[in-house]
């Protein structure tokens, strides 16, 4: 996840305008694992999820929307896939 942090409760000034909460993706990942175990739904491929900071003024960022925290994709773009080949993990920029 780009621009994400798990320390949103204790983050320094500017967290709200520069970063998005990682917790959203923790819940999505848990739901994906549950659906895999319970309903045999395949897990999404390893991927980079590109989030969008809210911008605005620190301490007064606009409300967060789904545009800021897009879902983990079942079919990510080729340029977002995290791959492993020849003992090397490749994470896109």
Image: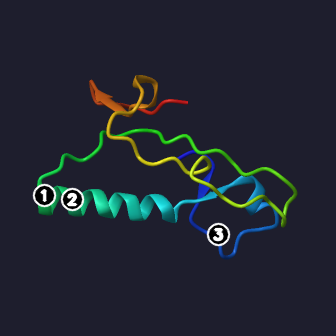
Relative depth, front residue between 32 and 89: 32
Residue 9's x, y, as percent? 66, 76
Residue 25's x, y, as percent? 45, 58
Say the numbered circle drawn on residue 30.
none
Say the numbered circle drawn on residue 39.
1
Tag 2 and tag 1, C-beta contact below 8 Å: yes
Image point (84%, 64%), residue name: 60
Relative depth, front residue between 78 and 89: 78
Q: Residue 47, relative to residue 30: is it above or below?
A: above
Q: Which quadrant is the C terminus positioned in?
A: top right
Residue 2's x, y, as percent? 58, 45
Q: Quadrant of residue 57?
A: bottom right
Q: Residues within 10 Å of mark 3 (few under 14, many from 20)?
A: some
Label 2 to label 1: alpha-carbon separation: 5 Å
The residue that label 3 is drawn on is 8
The residue that label 2 is drawn on is 35
């Amino acid at each position: 996840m780009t621009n994400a942090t798990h320390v949103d409760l204790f983050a320094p000034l500017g967290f709200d305008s520069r970063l998005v909460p990682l917790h959203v993706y923790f819940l999505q990942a848990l739901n994906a694992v549950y659906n895999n175990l319970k309903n045999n739904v395949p897990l999404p491929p390893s991927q980079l999820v590109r989030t969008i900071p809210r911008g605005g003024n620190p301490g007064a960022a606009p409300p967060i929307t789904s545009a800021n925290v897009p879902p983990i994709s079942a079919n990510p773009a080729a340029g977002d896939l995290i791959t492993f080949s020849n003992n090397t993990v490749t994470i896109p920029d």
